[in-house]
């Protein structure tokens, strides 16, 4: 790139520089921090989230993992990530045999239609993954900040 | 002021799995929103939720700004012995609430 | 031949049944058009965020306040008994104001006159809203029953006219959306018939509990009209018309809406 081009491109790059925002890449990176080098496998985990919501401010989400939840075999943690909110992390939850059932429910904010992923860390060191796409519709009438 | 609501069974048989469901009054301000004057509204979230049963932490959650306002959290416990279930929410600006319910185990 | 006779008989019986059942009420609560996930939030008290305000209201109900050192319970006793049906018949005539008042205004008047507290800040004072939610809960499941009080007639008629009157830069009346185009969609949202069946309610958009007046203010701002001040008679008039229009519908308060 010539010097002149570089000068021309600089303000454009500034404009295009994304504000701190999660991206599919940022989500994968955040997931790697949990997974290390392990490859998560689908199956034995359900991510229950409505496919279409009227409002992204409170989207019900539940993660259910198939596990006897005994000392020998249980879910150690459940991690949820998203790909387009300002940050990729939604929550980390730690549980164990005392939980009895590997099931966590909450409500999340989704700034836009996007993919959500849940990872379960099992006591044998393996990981399971479930993903879901949520479409967030936009309201026509909303309160203006006052 | 009642700023959290906990619904949990009062009694259970030993070994029975019970569900604990909670709501907490909290704005969960993300820190990414601009106010009317254009400047960012500072982040104010619940950062951690935990549950101890009979003195042992049995469930813990790290929350992010992506958790909805007035956070709803539901999880499960295996009833072991009669004892206090202590739920604790802590967060930005010194937010700290503790609520105790007692589970009678027969 | 026998089959045709049977068919004719069946049609006759069916038309008779149709003639005998009164026509179905075409009015729909906004609840009917909500996504299952949002309905579930309203249906379950342990999941309904509005219950946080109800719990605050319950605590406030028996807390002595103001120069009178009186609690709501001092005059009104047990809310589960004394407040049953109250929210279903507001707005009502408030002698202290010499005018019709919404339930939230009425709660505010009580706090000023009988507890001797300073007036609540206009808009959404949290304590007043919490009491409103707690009082409204005592009418959950009851039909909306506007009182037949002649003193309300003028304001109710004004509200009806206001509902049909074009306002704001978009030059729209309430009726353009909520009577002429209900059931259709505006962007991604269903246009409801605007029956106030669940107020005060937790709106996911607000991430907060709010009154009918707050919702009406949003509508007025939405059509680019200048909203009236808090507790202005225009709001009361509109509420009177809306409750009259929704009379007999079941109160779901405190509800949840997207």
Image (cartoon, grey):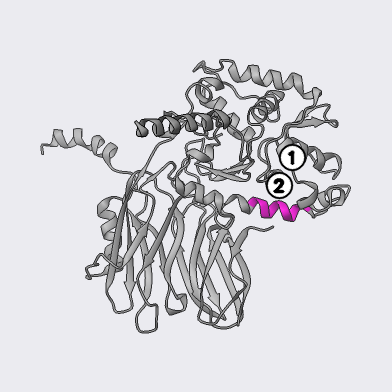
Which residue in the protein does label 1 denote?
C120
Residue C115 visible (yes or no):
yes
Proximity of marks 1 and 2: CB atoms separated by less than 8 Å: yes
Element carrying mark 2: helix
Residue at 57 percent across and 25 percent down: it is: C220
- Label the magenta part by its dominant secondary structure: helix
Residue at 44 percent across and 42 percent down: it is: A55
Element carrying mark 1: loop
Q: Is residue B8 above or below residue A10?
A: below
Count the numbered circles shown: 2
Q: Which residues are drawn in magenta?
A: C53-61
- Where is residue B46? Give x, y as percent: 51, 59
Residue extending furthest toward the right = C68
Which residue in the protein does label 2 denote?
C127
Q: Is residue C170 above or below residue A43?
A: above
Q: Residues within 10 Å of mark 1 (few under 14, many from 20)?
A: some
Image quarter in which the N terminus of chain B is found: bottom right
Judge whether residue C55 is colored magenta.
yes
Point out the tag, 1 or 2, that comes first from the N-terminus: 1
Mark 1 against mark 2, which lies toward the viewer? 2
C9 horizontally vs C200: left or right: left
Residue extending furthest toward the left = A2
Give how far apart the Cα atoms at labels 1 and 2 are: 9 Å
- Where is residue A117? Give x, y as percent: 32, 58
- Where is residue A129? Give x, y as percent: 28, 64
Residue at 71 percent across and 48 percent down: it is: C138
Q: Residues within 10 Å of mark 2 (few under 14, many from 20)?
A: some
Report the front residue among A50 and C183: C183
Residue B31 visible (yes or no):
no
């Amino acid at each position: 790139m010539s010097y002149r081009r570089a000068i021309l491109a600089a303000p454009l790059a500034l404009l295009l520089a994304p504000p701190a925002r999660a991206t599919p890449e940022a989500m994968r990176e955040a997931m790697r921090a949990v997974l290390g080098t392990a490859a998560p496998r689908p199956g034995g985990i359900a991510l229950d989230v409505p496919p279409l919501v009227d409002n992204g401010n409170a989207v019900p989400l539940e993660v259910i993992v198939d596990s006897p939840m005994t000392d020998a075999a249980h879910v150690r943690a459940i991690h949820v990530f998203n790909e387009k909110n300002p940050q990729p992390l939604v929550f980390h939850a730690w549980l164990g045999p005392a939980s009895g059932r590997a099931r966590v429910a909450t409500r999340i904010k989704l700034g836009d239609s996007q993919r959500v992923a849940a990872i379960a860390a099992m006591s044998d060191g393996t990981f399971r993954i479930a993903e879901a796409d949520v479409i967030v519709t936009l309201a026509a009438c909303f309160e203006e900040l006052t | 002021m009642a700023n959290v609501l906990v619904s949990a069974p009062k009694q259970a048989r030993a070994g029975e799995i019970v569900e604990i469901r909670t709501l907490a009054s909290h704005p969960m301000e993300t820190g990414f929103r601009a106010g009317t004057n254009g400047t960012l509204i500072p982040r104010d979230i619940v950062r951690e939720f935990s549950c101890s049963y009979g003195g042992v932490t049995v469930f813990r959650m790290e929350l992010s700004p992506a958790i909805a306002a007035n956070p709803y959290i539901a999880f499960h416990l295996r009833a072991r012995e009669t004892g206090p279930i202590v739920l604790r929410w802590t967060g930005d600006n010194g937010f700290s609430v503790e609520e105790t319910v007692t589970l009678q185990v027969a | 031949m026998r089959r045709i006779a049977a068919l004719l008989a069946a049609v006759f019986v069916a038309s008779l049944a149709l003639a005998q059942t009164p026509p179905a009420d075409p009015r729909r609560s906004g609840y009917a058009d909500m996504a299952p996930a949002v309905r579930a939030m309203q249906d379950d008290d342990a999941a309904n965020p509005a219950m946080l305000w109800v719990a605050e209201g319950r605590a406030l109900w028996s807390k002595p306040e103001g120069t009178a050192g009186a609690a709501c319970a001092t005059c009104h006793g047990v809310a589960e008994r004394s407040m049953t049906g109250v929210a279903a018949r507001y707005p009502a005539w408030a002698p202290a104001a010499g005018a019709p008042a919404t339930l939230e205004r009425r709660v505010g008047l009580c706090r000023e006159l009988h507890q001797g507290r300073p007036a609540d800040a206009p808009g959404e004072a949290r304590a007043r809203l919490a009491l409103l939610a707690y009082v409204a809960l005592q009418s959950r499941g009851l039909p909306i029953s506007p009182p037949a009080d002649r003193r309300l007639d003028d304001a109710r008629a004004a509200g009806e006219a206001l509902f049909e009157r074009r306002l704001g830069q978009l030059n729209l009346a309430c009726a353009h959306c909520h009577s002429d185009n209900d059931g259709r969609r505006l962007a991604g949202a269903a246009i409801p018939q605007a029956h106030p069946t669940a107020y005060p309610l937790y709106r996911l958009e607000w991430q907060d509990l709010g009154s009918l007046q707050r919702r009406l203010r949003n509508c007025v701002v939405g059509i680019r009209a200048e909203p009236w001040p808090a507790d202005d008679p225009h709001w009361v008039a509109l509420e009177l018309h809306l409750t009259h229009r929704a009379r007999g519908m079941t109160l779901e308060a405190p509800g949840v809406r997207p």
